[in-house]
Amino acid sequence: MAVSDHVDFAAFMEGVRTRNPGQTEFIQAVQEVAEDIYEFIDDKEQYHTAQILRRMAEPDRVVSFRVCWEDDTHRIRVQRGWRVQSNNAIGPYKGGIRFHPNVTESILKFLAFEQTFKNSLTGLPMGGAKGGADFDPKGKSDAEVMRFCQSYMTELYRHIGPDTDVPAGDIGVGSREIGYMFGQYKRITNRWEGVLTGKGREYGGSELRPEATGYGAVYFLQDMLNHKNNSIEGKTVVISGSGNVATHAAEQILKQGGKVLTLSDSGGFVHDPEGFTQEKIDWVKDHKIKRRGRMSEYANEFKGATYHEGLRPWGVPCDLAMPCATQNELNEVEAKTLVSNGVIAVSEGANMPTTLEGVHVFHDARIMYGPGKAANAGGVAVSGLEMSQNAERVSWNHERLGTMLTELMKGIHSQCVEYGDQGDGYVDYAKGANIAGFKKVADAMLAYGVV
Ligand code: NDP
Ligand code: 2IT
């Protein structure tokens, strides 16, 4: 029988900081979760004795590898690639791959840690992982991206599999990159299997997967507002980003009768006071995703819109805010600006877009705050459904998947309410998501003993 080893919150976090020097994003993600979990497990000795949180804050494994490729001028380039497999207590490892020059082990460890809780919340059998490389797809030719993806997969393939670990897309990894990686996996292994999700519809991809994260984040926003007898209809919405998540979030806001005022990229933001119509969103999708252009060109295309170089959109007054670009893109000062401008709800399409201090501002102001691990779980949920379809060798139609996605998001919302309702009319969605996500994984880990 193990001896109880009840370490308090401060000592736990000190240990995390000491063991992960310089890994600021990872430490931030663990702290955000541990603040809530410590309160929940205070009187639950079994979790302390089994050191569950300590074990969850230590990835099962971190694989790091060299990725060499040749550019179009015949220069040899060397990148660093990773796969972080955080936890597979409730299912095969599952999570995206990010290609971005700022990718570090800390960023992938934070994303894999968050993914474990997110995937648990979906109710589907998926563990948590994340991968990526410090490769910058911007300005690269298709042939260069193909050679990089093939080289990355030539190492990755030995660590993944449909019952082991199933990667998908994330920042810088869309259908083009998934195609190149799936092609290489199939070529090396001689197996056609559901080893990646987010595939093209022609070769095993699921209907609704491209839309699922952005649409799901809007459904979650709608669920939070409905809970307070309110709705998106007639509300103004500020969105950051202009990639997969942001453009589909904008599209679904329009469908719900809201008005999208902004979109952005790493260069700056566009403010369109008339609101983004479907035609304008289609232009952004085409321009950013197909032509790989910049948002700075939007204002030349659509009259009345202004481009704000080097700035983020949070100063534009709005009812609802959706950060859909990247981590730590909304800080304490920007959170205060949103609150003083009267924002009533925030739904995070991105992973950990709000800093810890910013999250505290939203809580203190008691606005509805839907954290990424709950609000953006629609993407991985439809990935889970893509895995089911591949395993069964069937394709479900758009309508069926649409119903499943709305139901999955409602299920996540009600788990957040179950564990996050403060009893005075305020729902702490972050606390609810953390506890509900934790409990399922933790109880599975308890069942396995010391492994
Ligand atoms: P994309 O690559 O399609 O788009 C990313 C967008 O964010 C681009 O507009 C990009 O601008 C902007 N961006 C990226 N890095 C930065 C940065 N450092 N500073 C400012 N802007 C930045 O990615 P996704 O839309 O897929 O992902 C967006 C977010 O959503 C990420 O946090 C991701 O982890 C999360 N997410 C994605 C899911 C999915 O299914 N795709 C699922 C759940 C969460 P630029 O073009 O200038 O780089
Ligand atoms: O952050 C995320 O949830 C994703 N990038 C999607 C992961 C997935 O496996 O679909």
Image: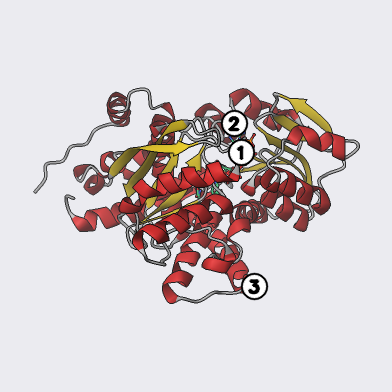
Query: To which residue does mark 2 refer?
Result: 329
348 or 225: nearer the eye?
348
Mark 3 surroundings: few (<14), some (14-19) or many (≥20) residues within 10 A: few
Which residue is drawn at the image coordinates 20% and 46% (left, top)? 50
| C-alpha separation, residue under disc 1 versus residue under disc 2 | 7 Å
Q: Residue 138's quadrant in the figure?
A: top right
Going by the numbered disc 1, the residue's amino acid type is: Ala
Query: Which callout, 1 or 3, points at the residue further toward the start of the chain?
Result: 1
Mark 2 surroundings: few (<14), some (14-19) or many (≥20) residues within 10 A: some
Q: Ligand 1 is located in which of the four quadrants?
A: top right
Query: To which residue does mark 3 refer?
Result: 399
Query: Which callout, 3 or 2, points at the residue further toward the start of the chain?
Result: 2
Going by the numbered disc 3, the residue's amino acid type is: Glu
Q: Position of residue 433 (x, y in %)?
A: 47, 48
Q: Is mark 2 within 8 Å of ligand 1?
A: yes
Going by the numbered disc 2, the residue's amino acid type is: Glu
Left or right, 3 with respect to 21, comes to left
198 or 365: nearer the eye?
198
| C-alpha separation, residue under disc 1 versus residue under disc 3 | 28 Å
Query: To which residue does mark 1 refer?
Result: 325
Verify CB contact (< 8 Å) between mark 1 and mark 2.
yes
Q: Residue 328's quadrant in the figure?
A: top right
